[in-house]
Amino acid sequence: MISSGCKFFHQKIFLVLELVYPDVMKQLLYLTLVVFWLVMMTSEVQAASGKPYAIAGKSWYVASADGRRVYFERNKNKVSSIASLSKMMAILVIVEEGLKLDAKTVLTDEDWALAAGGSRTRLKRNVAYTNRDLLHAALLGSDNRAVLGLGRAVGLNSQALTAKMNARARAMGLKSTSFADPTGIAHENVSTPYEVSRILKAASENALIAEVMQKVTYTVVEKPSNRRIVYNNTNILTRNGPHRKVLAGKTGFNTSAGYCVAVMLDLPGLGPTAFVVMGSSGMYQRFADVWKLIGNIENLQAREKREKTMREAVARRQEAAQPKNRVRPQPAQK
């Protein structure tokens, strides 16, 4: 049987598609999500048998936010390309440099040149956008030009921003993380699942960044044209609802990295928990991998609860079987 959390997740995705996407794209995405739903059904059946879920990602890491308890990991120290997960560090540096949200930044031809080879943008050249709008475009829509514009807003060109990102990584003790550009277009931007979880934790602890990352959608209104740009968070786990709230998160993809996701979830009974999946096989498979890992954790919780109950029952039986030490009355002293 599909869990109530999964049912809610599936329903929310289909509702968002129904409202947002045009018919042609909707049909394609519908087919993709049906496959995703079937994967989750298979996983639920597998969970009922007590077996752990199979994860498609090449490497992953799941641990408490403070890292004190590691629930599951595979190749947690494997170095690989991280694509747009790089933007977490870029935005962390930019915000810490004192980004003024209401100030405006104009995107330039240089931004387009530096973003060549990456994903397309809906932003325009020579239009003044508020830094607040660009921040949402960067984190929800993963817009490369927005990241470059935000860097310039705090006085950092692409090279200077990249240098600051690498310095921040060294300060955090991340020995396997390095950046060749701020956006993740460069396949030389590399890290490990474990070190990405440390960047994720730092991002989640920044109130402004966390607030933006938790949003499902955001609308930019260009001036003076009043053209509207709706950004839907590429991290569809934000549509989970309150049961497993997203505290922070980012997605990434390039041909070297595969499909990646890093997300901090507030799990019932466990609190903030970091999930990093790298090198997954599909856009939606990376989210299915996270759901499977959540299922593994829930199965682990259930098993630990059963084992604790059994230990307590054994202890009670042992205590009941012990002979009672009766204290005989002492004769009265004369």
Image (tube, rainbow, N blue to C red):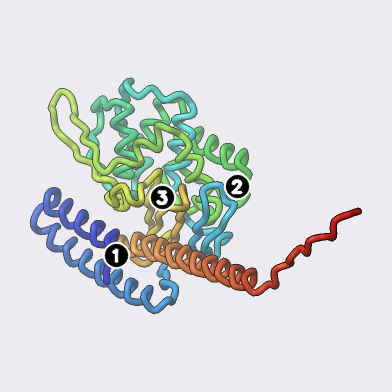
Q: Are marks 3 and 2 in contact (CB under 8 Å)?
A: no
Residue 324 x/y as whole percent: 70, 68
Toward the viewer: 138 or 1? Answer: 1
Q: Check residue 265 in the rendering and tell me which mark sits there, or answer none.
A: 3
Residue at the spot of label 1: 3
Q: Residue furthest front?
A: 334
Which amino acid, mark 2?
A: Leu
In the rendered view, tell whether residue 238 sits above or below residue 298: above
For label 2, the crowd category at 10 Å Cα-Cα, with few meaning under 14, some 14 to 19 and many 20 or more, is some
Residue in view at x 31 percent, y 22 percent: 104
Alpha-carbon span between mark 2 and mark 1: 38 Å
Toward the viewer: 334 or 122? Answer: 334
Residue at the spot of label 2: 174
Task: Classify mark 1: helix, strand or loop.
Answer: loop
Q: Nearer the viewer, mark 1 or mark 3?
A: 1
Alpha-carbon span between mark 1 and mark 3: 18 Å
Q: Nearer the viewer, mark 3 or mark 2?
A: 3
Q: Nearer the viewer, mark 2 or mark 1?
A: 1
Which amino acid, mark 3?
A: Leu
Q: Residue furthest right?
A: 334
Q: Earlier in the sequence, mark 1 or mark 3?
A: 1
Q: How many marks?
A: 3
In the rendered view, tell whether residue 270 sits above or below residue 136: below
